[in-house]
Image: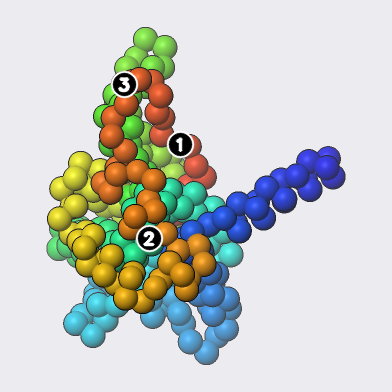
Amino acid sequence: MPMLQGFNTLRARSYSFRLPLFTRAMVVVMVAFWLAGLQSVWDIQQWGALIPDELTITTMYRVNTFPLIHLNFFHALFNILALAPLLDRFETEFGTLTSLALFFGPLTTIPALVYIFLEKFILRGNTAVMGASIWVFLLLGAEAIRTFKTNPYLMIGTYHIPTWTTPLAMVLVVEALIPNTSFLGHLCGVGTGYLFGLGYLKFLSPPEKALRWIESRLNLLGRLPHYISVDQKIYGRFGVLPTTNPTSSSTPLVLIGSSQRLGP
C-alpha cells in the first residue's frame, strides 16, 4: 500500500508539472480565491458569484469571476480535479492565447448570460451560482459532439445510446447525488459546449494571424514556460478530424464537480 500511494503521488506530481500555462494558471487562481475566502473581512463569494439581481453594468465582472470561486475546500478540490485534464486537452489543441481569449470571453459569458436570462426572467428566481463545473460540463459537451462524429452510439446491451447525450446523463447524475447543485447552470454549460463542438461559435475565436503577431511581438514562447503557441497545437484548430475507425474514440469519464448555490 505505501508503494501504491507513493506511485500515485509521483504520477500526480509529474502530471501537474506537465500542465500547460493557462490550465496551470486557472488552478492556481482557483486555489488563491479559496484561500482568500478563508478570511472574514471580505466576502469573496458574495463579491464574485453570479447572482442575477446583482448583475449590473458595474458588476459585469461576475460573468467571468464566478467559475473561479468556490464555496469550500471540497467544492474547489472536486472541480479542479474534474477541470484540469479537460482544460489541459483544450489548451493543447487550441493554444494558450486562444484558451485565454475564449474562456474569459464567449465560453464563459454566453452560458452566464443564458443562465441569468432563464433564472431571472423565465423562472423568476435569484439563485446564485459559482464554481468551475460550468466549464467542466461545457468541455464535456464539446467533447461529446466530437465523439459523436466518430462514434455515434454507445452500446449498452441491445440499446444504442447517442454519445452526444452522455453529458446530459452526467448532469442528471450530479443533480441526483450531490446536493445544492445548479441543474440549470450545468445545462447552460453543456448547451454552450454543444454549440462550440458543432462549430457555431468558432467565429468568436481570435484570428490566428493576430495571435501569431502577438506571440512574435512579445516573444511569448521564449519567455513563458509551458506556453503553447498557435503553431504548437497538436490538432486542428477547431477539433480533431473524424478518423476512419468509428470505434476509436470515446468520451473520457472524469470526476465531476458541482456549482454551489448561494441563494435559498
Q: Label 1, on which residue? A: 252
The kind of residue tagged 1 is Pro
The kind of residue tagged 3 is Thr
Binning the other alpha carbons within 10 Å of mark 2 as few (below 14), some (14 to 19) or many (20 upward) gives many
Residue 2 sits in which quadrant? Answer: top right
Give the x, y percent position of residue 191. Answer: 24, 47
Looking at the rendered structure, the secondary structure element under dot 1 is: loop
The N terminus - image quarter: top right
Between disc 2 and disc 3, whose residue precedes? 2
The kind of residue tagged 2 is Ser
Relative to residue 8, is residue 112 depicted above or below?
A: below
Give the x, y percent position of residue 163. Answer: 33, 29
Looking at the rendered structure, the secondary structure element under dot 3 is: loop
Q: Label 3, on which residue? A: 244
Residue 229: mark in rendering: 2
Binning the other alpha carbons within 10 Å of mark 1 as few (below 14), some (14 to 19) or many (20 upward) gives few
Tell me how far mark 1 sits from mark 3, CA to CA.
20 Å
> Residue placed at 20% from the left, 80% from the top?
56
Closest to the observer, 143 or 88: 88
Tell me how far mark 2 sits from mark 3, CA to CA.
29 Å
> Residue placed at 40% from the left, 39% from the top?
170
Between disc 1 and disc 3, whose residue precedes? 3
